[in-house]
Image (tube, rainbow, N blue to C red):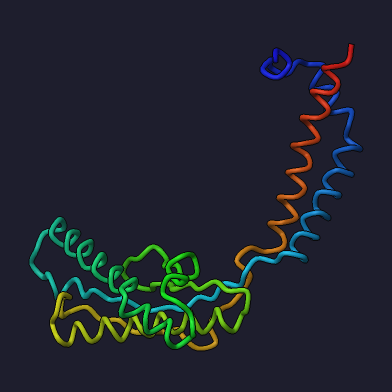
Amino acid sequence: MNLLFSPPSLDDLIRLLKAWRFWVLGALAGALLGAAVYALFPPPYRARATVNVDFNLEEAWPQETDRQQFYYLERETRKLEEIAWSDRVLQAVAQENGVSVTSLRQGVLSLSQPAEAGWHFYADDHDAERASALASAWALAFTEQVQAQVAAQTGLNSFIRVEAVQVQDIPVERRAGQGAYLLAGGLGFLAVGALLILFLDRGKP
């Protein structure tokens, strides 16, 4: 127990430095292991569609204070977020792509940090085309629902404008790149190797 919690000594650091060959081979082995994991169990694809959101702050609150404008932005942004995750929007996505609303809410769809300008609608799936279709459908359903509510003046400020600006041929890539797996494998092996060298050598008489 004392070996486990005692701070490293100068001898410990010297042992680690002397094992440089082990570190080189270990990092290589860890990177190869990461590459194998990536090849056998690749992460899902992530597609990104974009909707431009314009709150038209100057027209909506032309003579108000910064504080009032801030609350206006916060309130309307929260409303738009609720629309993005609303049953009506997600049901449209689910029906078009043959999935359940529950699965969409449980990690398939994700929304970038909303603000004025571009909102990014992400969809994850192990099939690249399916991920693209889900992200596009979500962005379009959100845009249509917001435009309908603005036109009907039900709940949203009439100055809000939304436009789906990127819903065709959208970017699709793996959610995590192979480089991240290589780095994680190499660093993980080095960390485990350092602990083994220190504790095994300390335990020797």
Q: How many marks?
A: 0
Above-or-below relation of 158 to 68: below
Instruction: Tell me the residue at 62%/74% (across/down).
Output: 126
- Of 144 and 66, the residue lying toward us: 144
Above-or-below relation of 31 to 73: above
Q: Is residue 185 left or right of residue 123?
A: right
Q: Is residue 102 left or right of residue 195?
A: left
Q: Is residue 155 left or right of residue 128?
A: left
The image shows residue 196 at horizontal and vertical percentages of 81, 30
Instruction: Tell me the residue at 77%/55% (across/down).
Output: 34
Instruction: Tell me the residue at 73%/43% (across/down).
Output: 188
Q: Is residue 133 left or right of residue 70?
A: right
The image shows residue 42 at horizontal and vertical percentages of 70, 66
Quarter of the image where one finds residue 5: top right
Question: The N terminus is located in which quarter?
Answer: top right
The image shows residue 87 at horizontal and vertical percentages of 31, 75
The image shows residue 33 at horizontal and vertical percentages of 81, 54
Quarter of the image where one finds residue 12: top right
- Of 114 and 38, the residue lying toward us: 38
Q: Residue furthest left?
A: 63
Question: The C terminus is located in which quarter?
Answer: top right
Q: Residue furthest right?
A: 21
Instruction: Tell me the residue at 37%/77% (across/down).
Output: 90
Quarter of the image where one finds residue 129: bottom right
